[in-house]
Image (cartoon, grey):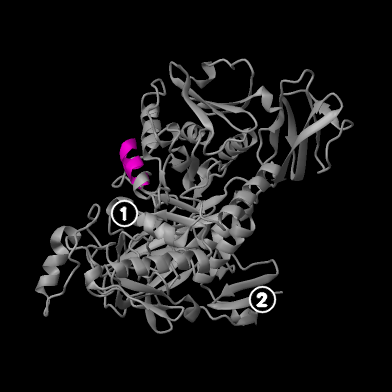
């Protein structure tokens, strides 16, 4: 797939330097939404950066959370506050953010900023926006930049009660009102000036490739056009959340400047069509979306799930795709438009999604390719075809997908749970169904010749050398073993005496170390708030696991205490039973109020202090004081220096006995060397 990857890189590098009129035509890239709701751990900038090599062959764009600081506490970024001066967010520091963007760019990945300009947070009052100075220019928003009917009139009620009265804009909201933060009046010349400077900073300084505009129903579409024409992003997509395809088209047209569309839109209509097809067991014909309109498919960013539709919890069920997740992804990845893969799906089904994207690229499918929806339909299945620059990709989805016979002129290349991909024989390519990557056990790779040439065979090597006519020959459909270690597989199509269309896959097969469960001790001091009763509410954020013995809020009443350095510490021990588990906690008193803000992702013994400071929600802030309690000095172990409260490794895991292996450990609150 190297040649296709280089094509994507070239497109990204070219389009990031010029205005693409909303979204480039003939674009063969796929986008990844690099987060889900409350993915504070999984979407850390450092973690996303570490995945760049794995993402690069498959994704040319990664959309990340709004990256500015939103004040105290954890935030997904939709209560945006700082636009210019503070980029230390819930996902990492500004330095880590810039490093990630730079790394992505070096791999051919453009970073898409989540731009939240419908509304903005304030500091201490309803209209107290931050005053920020950037590159010697001071940017400030005023009460007169707030829509006159903000928060269904509550903003005006507040303004009239002030002494002296506070003036809001004399214009109402140009879109839908959002009750919660200050809706900005985009007719204001000051708002436009600040927004343009902010967007220009994201592109020119931070290095973003383009924008995902949040909640564009909240302000008139023409303002997206004004902003894009001013700063000229290579990629722009609006979240116009509506299942009516004509309404979404109207918004796209509203972004026109000098007759040119300046933004794509998420294809909510096709998302709902796929959801309905799944619920109808795929037997019905899929409805129209942006992707099914020749005039708008260039501007269609299709998706299956996002952070607003996914299942979050029993109390926030949203509107998820509850079944046929792979089949739904197969649908969008085989269609025209620009598919956007949800991060949870990428994490859960990496091999399948990689194969789908490989198939999309090998067929040469772009956002403006011709897709025939409902090309084949039957009981409990539906199929589409998309003709790319190299061949036609046929995708079958549904419980009875296997009941559909392979049409003449096609070869099946992928078969998964309730989906199949077939490729037209005139593609004349070699196919490997196992994508490159790291695997934890030996794998099998199926080699397929997709060809309309008589006598076509396959030749391959596993040492990274280019296959020739003298290399090992196999028939189409042959399966080979990929064993432990690093293997570079190269497979070529052999027709007569010519080897062509060599596909390269690189595999790293490892034997994972056995996981050993470990304990995490959490100590909390409440002297500064004077609590006499302390409740521990503990959970594993990513796995949605509750660690409390009492499963209902406010969790477990903790009475066990230790006196350390003259202070009283309430403590509880938690057993981490699976690899990757980490603790998140909230502390409270009485029946659950007052309480602290959340503390996230502890994987070693930790000392926490509840401070007297509060966040915007009125929750006490918690300070990690482990470094003050556990000295960093290293001592050699001596018999009379051994303490009875246990041994720990440097990851904070408690050991059953004094260690026998040489190394550095913690005992009695000190680092000691066992020689």
Relative image position of residue 74 (x, y in whole percent): 38, 64
What residue is at 54 percent from the left and 71 percent from the top? 95
The residue labelled by disc 2 is 673
Relative image position of residue 579 (x, y in whole percent): 54, 52
Separation (CA) of disc 2 from disc 1: 40 Å
Relative image position of residue 460 (x, y in whole percent): 80, 34
Q: Secondary structure at mark 1?
A: loop
249 or 214, nearer to the observer:
249
Task: Write the start and end of the magenta stretch as one range.
Answer: 240-252
Q: Is residue 9 visible?
A: yes
- Left/right placement of residue 492 relative to residue 289 reads right
Q: Which mark is residue 550?
A: 1
Q: Quadrant of the C terminus?
A: bottom right
Q: Residues within 10 Å of mark 2 (few under 14, many from 20)?
A: some
249 above or below 470?
below
- Left/right placement of residue 634 relative to residue 157 reads right
What residue is at 41 percent from the left and 42 percent from the top? 305
**Labels in figure, total:** 2
458 above or below 665?
above
Residue 4 among those drawn in magenta: no
What residue is at 46 percent from the left and 50 percent from the top? 22
Tag 2 near tag 1, CB within 8 Å: no
Farthest front residue? Answer: 258
Q: Secondary structure at mark 2?
A: strand
Relative image position of residue 246 (x, y in whole percent): 32, 37
């Amino acid at each position: 797939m190297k040649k296709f990857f280089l094509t994507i890189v070239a497109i990204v590098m070219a389009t990031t330097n010029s205005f693409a009129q909303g979204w480039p035509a003939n674009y063969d890239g796929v986008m990844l939404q690099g987060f889900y709701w409350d993915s504070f751990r999984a979407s850390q900038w450092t973690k996303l950066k570490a995945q760049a090599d794995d993402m690069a062959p498959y994704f040319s764009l990664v959309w990340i959370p709004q990256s500015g600081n939103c004040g105290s506490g954890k935030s997904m970024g939709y209560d945006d506050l700082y636009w210019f001066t503070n980029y230390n967010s819930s996902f990492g520091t500004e330095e880590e953010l810039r490093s990630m963007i730079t790394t992505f760019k070096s791999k051919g990945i453009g970073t898409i900023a989540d731009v939240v300009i419908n509304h903005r947070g304030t500091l201490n009052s309803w209209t107290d926006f931050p005053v920020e100075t950037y590159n010697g220019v001071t940017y400030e928003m005023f009460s007169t930049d707030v829509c006159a009917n903000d928060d269904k009139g509550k903003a005006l009620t507040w303004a009239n009660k002030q002494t002296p009265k506070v003036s809001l804009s004399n214009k109402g909201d140009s879109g839908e009102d959002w009750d919660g933060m200050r809706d900005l009046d985009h007719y204001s010349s000051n708002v436009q000036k600040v927004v343009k400077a902010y967007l220009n900073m994201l592109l020119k300084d931070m290095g973003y490739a383009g924008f995902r505009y949040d909640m564009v129903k909240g302000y008139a579409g023409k303002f997206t056009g004004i902003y894009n024409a001013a700063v000229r992003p290579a990629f722009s997509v609006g979240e116009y959340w509506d299942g009516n395809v004509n309404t979404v088209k109207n918004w796209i047209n509203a972004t026109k400047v000098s007759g040119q569309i300046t933004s794509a839109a998420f294809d909510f209509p096709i998302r709902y069509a796929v959801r309905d097809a799944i619920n109808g067991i795929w037997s019905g014909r899929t409805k129209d979306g942006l992707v099914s309109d020749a005039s708008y498919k260039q501007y269609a960013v299709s998706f299956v799930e996002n952070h607003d539709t996914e299942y979050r919890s029993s109390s926030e069920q949203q509107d998820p795709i509850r079944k046929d997740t792979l089949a739904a992804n197969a649908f969008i990845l085989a269609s025209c438009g620009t598919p956007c893969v949800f991060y949870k799906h990428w994490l859960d089904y990496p091999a399948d999604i990689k194969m789908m994207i490989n198939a999309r690229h090998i067929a040469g499918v772009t956002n403006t390719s011709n897709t025939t929806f409902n090309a084949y339909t039957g009981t409990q299945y539906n199929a589409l075809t998309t003709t790319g620059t190299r061949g036609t990709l046929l995708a079958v989805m549904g419980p009875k997908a296997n009941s559909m016979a392979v049409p003449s002129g096609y070869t099946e290349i992928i078969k998964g749970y309730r989906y199949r991909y077939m490729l037209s024989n005139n593609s004349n390519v070699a196919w490997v169904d196992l994508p490159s990557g790291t695997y934890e056990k030996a794998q099998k790779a199926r080699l397929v010749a997709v060809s309309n040439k008589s006598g076509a065979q396959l030749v391959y090597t596993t040492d990274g050398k280019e296959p020739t006519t003298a290399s090992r020959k196999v028939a189409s459909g042959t399966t080979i073993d990929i064993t432990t270690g690093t293997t570079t597989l190269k497979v070529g199509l052999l027709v007569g005496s010519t080897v062509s269309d060599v596909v390269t896959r690189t595999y790293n097969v490892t034997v994972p170390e056995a996981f050993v469960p470990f304990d995490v001790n959490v100590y909390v001091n409440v002297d500064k708030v004077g609590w006499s009763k302390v409740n521990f509410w503990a959970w594993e954020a990513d796995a949605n696991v509750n660690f409390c013995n009492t499963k209902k809020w406010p969790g477990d009443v903790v009475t066990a205490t230790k006196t350390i350095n003259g202070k009283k510490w309430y403590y509880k021990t938690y057993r981490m039973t699976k690899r990757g588990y980490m603790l998140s906690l909230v502390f409270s008193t009485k029946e659950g109020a007052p309480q602290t803000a959340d503390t996230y992702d502890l994987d070693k013994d930790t000392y926490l202090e509840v401070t007297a400071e509060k966040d915007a929600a009125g929750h006490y802030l918690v300070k990690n004081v482990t470094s003050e309690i556990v000295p960093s000095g290293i001592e050699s172990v001596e018999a009379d220096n051994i303490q009875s409260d246990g041994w720990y490794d440097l990851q904070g895991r408690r050991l059953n006995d004094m260690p026998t292996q040489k190394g550095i450990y913690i005992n009695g609150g000190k680092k000691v060397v066992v020689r």
